[in-house]
Amino acid sequence: MHLEKLKLYNFRNYPELEVFFHDKMNLILGENGQGKTNLLESIYFLSRGRSFRNPNRELVKTGEEKAFVDGIFVRNDTDSKEHVQITMNYGLSAEGTSILLNRKKLKSRSELAGKILIVDFTPEDLSIVKDGPDKRRRFIDNELLNIKPVHGAALKEYGKILRQRNELLKTMQRDPSVKDTLFVWDERLVKTGKKILFNRIGFMQKINGIAKEIHENLTDGKEALKLYYYSNLIKNNDDLSSFEEIFRQKLDQNLSQDIRRGSTSAGPHLDDIKININDMDAKTYGSQGQKRTCALSLKLSQTSIIKEETGEDAIVLLDDVMSELDGNRQQRIMEHFKDNQIVITSTEISFLDQLPKSMKKIYNVKSGK
Ligand code: ATP
Ligand code: MG
């Protein structure tokens, strides 16, 4: 799939813009603060109906009330076109965001899911490797959602049960008699928690092989990437069949502590993913460039999964990805995604020197023009 044409109106610092894209390599070139990431954000916005950074109302050019983004995408298999237009009305009219797909208005943003196949990498994705477990849980849950939408329902349900259980624990600090109702919440937590854990472990098996291969590719075979799902309840896959029992036992064991804290100290909401490079923890021992390559391999494994599931090559959006990477890794990224349309931002151009003129288009961005 590729983006053929993009039109912006009052989007961020772009008053008006019309761009035709190359179906392979597009470099958005410019100095800091000129609108490179904004342009990438507008493309991402067409696939999700929301930004990768801010709430939609902040996307409207300051001082304006209405913005729109319009994109024409072409599917590789049939040459059929998807036309997506998103209009945002804020300020006095306060109508919010409306989305048109092939000129038909969608009832909700979720109807856009899976229509425009985009995989993005932004500097914030480094947090998958560098920051706390919540970032890694969110990463895996988001990736999972793309191929297994029912995971979303399980997560929502689990979150709701957890909040209610925690409320009950707080009430128990004052009124121990409510304890009788606790087992109802525990049972629901265990059942839904099991769904989440099984979905995640299944997905980990899938992504492990793919991310490892990408990583090997990007590092010229020098680094072996391995992911481990770290559950606070089970130690290895042999324990999977007794997950429910183990979870119930742990909830019982931790009860007095949980009442004191007013929160639940066991369950998949506290799990983590360990990311190893050559058997060393990437978070603790990895260099800047290694962490970046790791985050890239993880995030971009989605392109292989999309290809497997849909037969389509996703559009790859790369924001400021080349900094901190050596020339070899830069070239390998280009090679790895040679079948995909790439839109990449950068302040410099040299990594494209080897690519023939006919294979690329370069856009100079200055002050939203
Ligand atoms: P860098 O190389 O530093 O990442 P960039 O080219 O990616 O820079 P962007 O983040 O795309 O820069 O654009 C930043 C510019 O957009 C800033 O000057 C900012 O003031 C402007 N901007 C952001 N949001 C809006 C908005 N809603 N209305 C008008 N201008 C905006
Ligand atoms: Mg930027």
Image (cartoon, grey):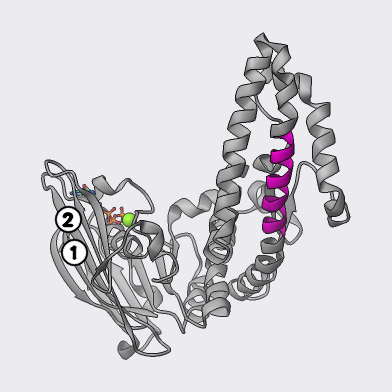
Q: Is residue 348 above or below residue 288?
A: below
Give how far apart the Cα atoms at labels 2 and 1 are. Answer: 8 Å
Instruction: Please state if 210 lies on the left or on the right of 229 as rendered.
Output: left
Disc 2 designates what residue?
A: 67
Location of residue 170 (image quadrant): top right
The image position of residue 107, as x and y in percent, is 32, 58
143 is higher (above) or lower (below) than 5: above
Q: Quadrant of the C terminus?
A: bottom left
Residue 261 higher or lower than 211, as above or below: above
**Residue sitting nearer the eye, 271 or 153:** 153
Q: Position of residue 162 (x, y in %)?
A: 62, 34
> Are the residues at dot 2 and dot 1 in contact (C-beta closer than 8 Å)?
yes
Vertical placement of residue 167 versus 146, above or below: above
Q: Quadrant of residue 251?
A: top right
Over which residues does the magenta segment extend? 186-201
Q: How far across and down, in percent of the image, does residue 260 sit?
A: 70, 16
Q: Residue at x 69, y 40 (%)?
A: 188
The residue that mark 1 highlights is 8
- Regarding mark 1 in the picture, which secondary structure is present there? strand
Q: Position of residue 303 (x, y in %)?
A: 52, 73
Q: Earlier in the sequence, mark 2 or mark 1?
A: 1
Mark 1 closeness class: few <14, some 14–19, many ≥20 residues within 10 Å: many
Whether residue 131 appears in this view of the structure is no
In this picture, residue 281 sits left or right of residue 65: right
